[in-house]
Amino acid sequence: MRLIGTRVVFHVAPEFEDLEFWVPLMRLQEEGAETVVAGMAAGDVYQGKHGLTVRTHVGFDDVHPADFRGMVIPGGWAPDKLRRFESVRSLVREFDRQHKTIAMICHAGLVGISAGIVKGHFATGSEGIKDDLINAGAVWRDEPAFRSSHLVWGRVVADIPAFCRELVAALREHN
């Protein structure tokens, strides 16, 4: 219960990677964090790539950075949808400006790229976005999970345990 009093927002859209959403969410809840799920609108139900569903608590426009210590963006195909919304890009930029924890795994780096926050940072993710990250100015590291300043990076589903360790540690340090 090391994260009591910590609020973390999860950004989701259809076809999120189920495990990359549910495992970090439950891990943070296990530590006592309050988790809030954001989507296009409050009450939306999205299905993950493997059939699990989630109902959003709030819309992206109702997320206020001052109310949260961190943000998690799961992978899957959802990041390619999320990156298209100015409200999401704006939130990511504001969290970055305030040096709040931003955790991205697998394809989630696409959102960081579109928000313009990856340049100069070490980064990882699905091999499919390696060139995109490098072209956006990030320095690629083929490692399971790590932090680059306030950004928490995870590679793929198999690396979720390491990703969760880095995420919890980052939130604890800034709590």
Image (cartoon, helix red, strand yellow):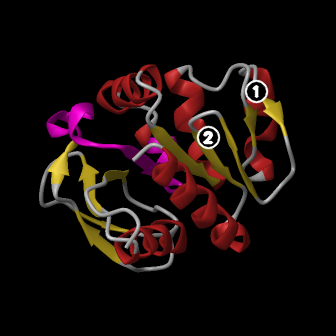
In the picture of the structure, the residue carrying the numbered disc 2 is 109
| Three-letter residue code for mark 1 | Ala
Q: How many marks?
A: 2
Q: Residues within 10 Å of mark 1 (few under 14, many from 20)?
A: many
Which residue: 48% across, 72% down?
18
Provide residue 66's location: percent of width, then percent of height.
23, 32
Tag of residue 110? none
Comparing 72 with 79, the one in front is: 72
Label 2 sits on a secondary structure element that is helix
Q: Position of residue 146 (x, y in %)?
A: 72, 50
Q: Which residues are magenta?
A: 60-81
Asked which quadrant contains residue 67, the reply is top left
Q: Which residue is mark 1?
A: 138
Q: Assess whether residue 80 is covered by the magenta stretch.
A: yes
Q: Residue at image x 51%, y 47%?
A: 173
Left or right side of 5 for 62: left
Q: Which of the pair 175/128 is nearer the observer?
A: 175
Residue at point 54% right, 67% down? 20
Is 97 displayed left or right of 140 in the figure? left
Tell me whether circle 2 and circle 1 mark residues in contact (CB < 8 Å).
yes
